Image: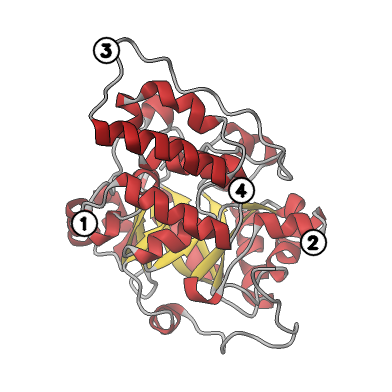
Amino acid sequence: QVSKMEPADAPLRPKLEGFDFWKSIGSPRYVLAPMVDTSELPFRLLCKRYGTELSYSPMLNQNTFVNAPADVRATLWSTCPEERPVFAQIAGDDPERMLQAAKLVENECDAVDVNLGCPQSIARRGNYGAFLQDQWDTVRKIITTLHQHLKVPVTAKFRKQFTLERSIGYAQLLVECGAQVICMHGRTRKQKGILLGVADWDTMRIVRDSIPTTPFISNGSIHNMDDARRCFEVTNCQAVMSGEPIRRNPALFSGRAVPGRQLAGEYLEICKQYPVPIHMIRDHVHRMMMPTFDIHYDLRQELFTAPTIPVLEERLAVLDRRIESGFVPPKESPPPPPAEEPASSPQPDEDMGAGFLFE
């Protein structure tokens, strides 16, 4: 058991609001985005080691999380004291069900975040994420219910709307209902995959200025520290958030060029202490070392079929020896990365592994 639930009547700290709350968690400036199958505890700890100051959990579906047995739930949400602060993100459309899910984590997180930004088809079918942006009454009830009944603050992460007026109105609605921190992704729900484009920082600045008494996190197009600095200047935000870029480079917020092999090795050591499903581990290692596997493409299959951490480490050692000897495989068209076998997942209604499409 990674973390231990406190008694139901023992809040972590007095419930603070707005900037008082923000200061109580250290006024973080660099934030890891919530991503399914990606922002799990070992990866959050690795990112924290390299400059991340606040992390979000992967999205927790209201029904899956509430209905799951305790042992399964522990695979969906885990934490430890050294990673704080951390926000637990919940997705759904039923205020009471959302509250049930939030009550299961409120003693182990610093805030509960409402997912209003997922643009994927799974969110459309489940009626959550960015597809609640047309249902303001539902959103109002969710935020109000959580604000009134949780011991910790409620926060919200949403996407740029299709008009500036609606973006401003949506942000103001969330704050009026009790959201203590607002995170805005500067892309609309249609901007994903090949239509990703760049985040609209100018609109984010206008929205940010419309809610001046609320801490604001800017999300989108943060690929390096130069981007982070420019985003602070343009959007006047309190913090910047990175998603897909930090998947490839967990040291992004350190501003240092840390070799992917070093990051992968550190990540594996953390996973030994805080185990997670092997498919997550393989995917993280591959992303951190993608330039190397682009050259040694013939070893990708070896990576993706490793059944355990020790076997994965043995196969990375083969790669290390190959690099040390100077061997490079013949120049030929590399095969595409093998598709992961669908993981046996306790969250069938999650869009597993799709976070990179909309960060």
Quarter of the image that includes the C terminus: top left
Quarter of the picture containing the N terminus is bottom right
Question: Residue 176 versus residue 37: which sits nearer the camera?
Answer: 37
Spatial CA distance of label 3 from label 1 is: 31 Å
Residue 77 vs 106, above or below: the answer is above
SS for dot 1 = loop
Per the model, the C-alpha gap separating discs 4 and 2 is 32 Å
For the residue marked with disc 2, what is the amino acid? Ala
- For label 2, the residue is 70
Identify the residue shown where x is 33% and y is 71%. Answer: 212
Mark 3 or mark 2: whose residue is earlier in sequence: 2
| 3 and 2 marks in contact (CB < 8 Å) | no
Where residue 331 is drawn, which disc sits there? 3
Instruction: Tell me which amino acid carries mark 1.
Output: Arg
> Residue 150, located in which quarter of the rendered image?
bottom right
Name the secondary structure under disc 4.
loop
**Image vertical order of residue 41 relative to residue 1, above or below:** above
Could you classify mark 4 by the number of other residues whose Cα lies within 10 Å: few (under 14), some (14-19), or many (20 or more)? few
Q: Nearer the viewer, mark 4 or mark 3?
A: 3
Res 134 seen here: no
Q: Answer with mark 2 or mark 1, whichever residue precedes in sequence.
A: 2
Compared with 238, 258 (above or below) is above
Residue at numbered disc 1 = 256
Front-most of residues 23 and 190:
23
Residue appearing at x 41%, y 56% in the figure: 266
- Packing grade of label 1 (10 A; few <14, some 14-19, many >=20) is few
Residue underneath mark 4: 135
Please state the horizontal and vertical placement of residue 143, each as a whole percent of the image. 60, 65
Mark 4 and mark 3 residues within 8 Å of each other at the beta carbon = no
Image-based side of 229 in relation to 296, left or right: left
